[in-house]
Image: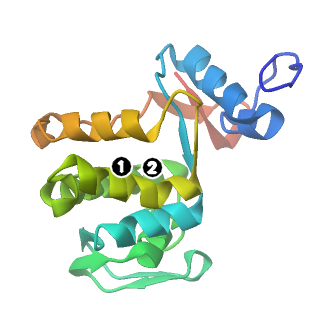
Amino acid sequence: AVEGYGGMSAHSGMINSAMTFGGMGCQWKTVEQTTGVHLDHFIMMDFVGFKDMVDAIGGVEMCIPEPVDDPKAHLVLDAGLQTLDGEESLGFVRSRYGQGDGSDLSRIDRQQEFMGAMLREVLSSEVMTNPVTITNFLGAVTDSITTDENLTVDIMTDIAISMREVDLDRVQFVTVPNGQHPDDENRITLR
């Protein structure tokens, strides 16, 4: 049992449905078993925390290739290089219908692009200059995140400090191989 949940028989469903059925522990185990990738820690951030984190670093610079107007994501952006604040960033990573082909895969690509830009912003900002500022930054966002019990602010600080030595050219975001689900053209499946 995970987090007091007794489990359920195997079934086919969207990978994030494990969170609804069994909480964070169930989602963690589902990702590990489905992908074969071991997860050391788990962080779940709510929308407020995401916006606060972006605002805490002074926004994230992005080059928007074409104007965006997505009423469902509450997002209107001009094309070109600009710094997105927390609210705009949330709209950007959630937007589906105003950008790309409207698919989840297109949105995942944008989310990965944004995370790369945010990582560059954090690593080049004064947030990373010393353990005190890193701890203060992490303290500001911990109210809006849920982690596994072993991922403390001290451990997050150690991870952040070690990130200062990372060559950003070696950071890669990947998506699992996938394709159209044979039984539902509106869904994708892992391959």
Q: Residue 108 carries which label?
A: 2
Image quadrant in which you'd find residue 161? top left
Estimate how packed mark 1 is, as few (under 14), some (14 to 19) or many (20 or more) residues with alpha carbons within 10 Å: some
Q: Residue at x 41, y 63 (%)?
A: 53
Residue 28 % position (x, y): 61, 27
- Does any portion of residue 7 appear in the rendered image? yes
What residue would you read off at disc 1?
112
Residue 149 % position (x, y): 59, 30
Q: Which residue is drawn at 65% across and 23% down?
A: 30
Q: Is mark 1 on a helix, strand or loop?
A: helix
Residue 58 % position (x, y): 28, 73
In the rendered structure, the answer to whether residue 165 lies left or right of residue 9 reads: left
Front residue of this view, candidates 48 and 160: 160
Q: Which mark is residue 124?
A: none
| Cβ atoms under marks 1 and 2 closer than 8 Å | yes
Quarter of the figure that contains the N terminus = top right
- Does any portion of residue 182 appear in the rendered image? no
> Is 97 drawn above or below residue 129 in the view shown?
below
Residue 76 % position (x, y): 44, 85
Q: Which amino acid does label 1 sit on?
A: Gln
